[in-house]
Image (cartoon, helix red, strand yellow):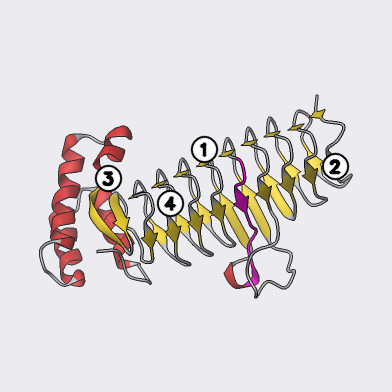
């Protein structure tokens, strides 16, 4: 049975599952769909063409699906998709996509979006990421899986951050951050691998050692990037993690942090 506070304003056209909870003074727009078990706290605004999956928790004063902060946005019917079991803390903001970016902003499953973080238009987040307090993702940013974005990090438009990467607090990230790497500073530079993050995910010592060798070849051997990637491909063909690292760097359009 739904638990809707008497002061909540829910448009009759909104599609809420039977057990969704909505707290005092929250506002739900007409094109919103919210799935089973999701809890909306007080003073939350959910607008636009926003689809929210199951088991999410959205805390007070978050704004979800409001108009993109993009001067090129002209009211097109873009969307925001939020998956399952995400936690969206106080004052976080998430915007839908735009015509210039594919029309969709997407958040996967089991993500933690801490207070005051911002997910801009046309961003894509994978699964099990942590976006810490005050971090800001510019438009079109891609965050893969198991990424930790430290507090007050700023990520430039169109940057990609690979799986299991770590962005240190206060970093300004203007280039792609490869999978498994640790990047910090202004402008962010690579500081080695995110070894602790890999240990937490259950990577064994052999996998980590192989990634360390590949990292040194790519970033410390003073080879041209193309030559380094070819060498790593040849020497570690059996490592899925190394091949993912190589593919990410080879596909970078902005260039990677060094």
**SS type, badge 1:** loop
Where residue 202 appears, as percent x and y from the top left, is 29, 32
**SS type, badge 2:** strand
Mark 3 or mark 4: which is in front?
Answer: 3
Q: Is residue 93 magenta?
A: yes
Determine the CA span between mark 3 and mark 1. 20 Å
Give the position of the C terminus as an image quadrant: bottom left
Number of numbered markers: 4
Where residue 131 appears, as percent x and y from the top left, is 47, 46
Residue placed most toward the observer, 62 or 4: 62
Determine the CA span between mark 2 and mark 3. 45 Å
Identify the residue at image location x=63%, y=70%.
70
Compared with 253, 1 (above or below) is above
Instruction: Name the residue beneath numbered marker 4.
Output: 144
Residue 244 shows in this picture: no
Instruction: Name the residue beneath numbered marker 3.
Output: 194
Instruction: Name the residue beneath numbered marker 1.
Output: 110
Sequence-first disc among 2 and 1: 2
Instruction: Name the residue beneath numbered marker 2.
Output: 9
């Amino acid at each position: 049975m739904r638990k809707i506070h008497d002061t909540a304003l829910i448009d009759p056209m909104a599609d809420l599952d039977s057990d969704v909870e909505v707290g005092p003074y929250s506002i739900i727009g007409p094109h919103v769909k919210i799935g089973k078990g999701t809890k909306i706290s007080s003073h939350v605004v959910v607008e636009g063409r926003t689809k929210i999956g199951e088991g999410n928790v959205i805390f007070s004063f978050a704004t979800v699906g409001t108009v993109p902060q993009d001067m090129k946005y002209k009211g097109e019917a873009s969307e925001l998709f939020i998956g399952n079991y995400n936690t969206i803390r106080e004052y976080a903001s998430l915007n839908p996509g735009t015509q210039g970016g594919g029309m969709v902003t997407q958040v996967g499953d089991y993500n933690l979006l801490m207070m005051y973080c911002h997910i801009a238009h046309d961003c894509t987040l994978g699964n099990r990421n942590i976006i810490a307090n005050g971090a800001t993702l510019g438009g079109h940013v891609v965050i893969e899986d198991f990424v930790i974005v430290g507090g007050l990090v700023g990520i430039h438009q169109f940057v990609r951050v690979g799986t299991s990467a770590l962005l240190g607090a206060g970093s300004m990230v203007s280039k792609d951050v490869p999978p498994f790497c640790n990047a910090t500073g202004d402008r962010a530079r690579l500081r080695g691998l995110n070894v602790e993050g890999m240990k937490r995910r259950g990577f064994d010592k052999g996998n980590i050692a192989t990634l360390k060798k590949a990292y040194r070849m790519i970033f410390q051997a003073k080879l041209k990037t193309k030559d380094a990637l070819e060498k790593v491909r040849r020497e570690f063909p059996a490592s899925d993690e190394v091949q993912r690292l190589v593919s990410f760097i080879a596909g970078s359009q902005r260039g990677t942090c060094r």
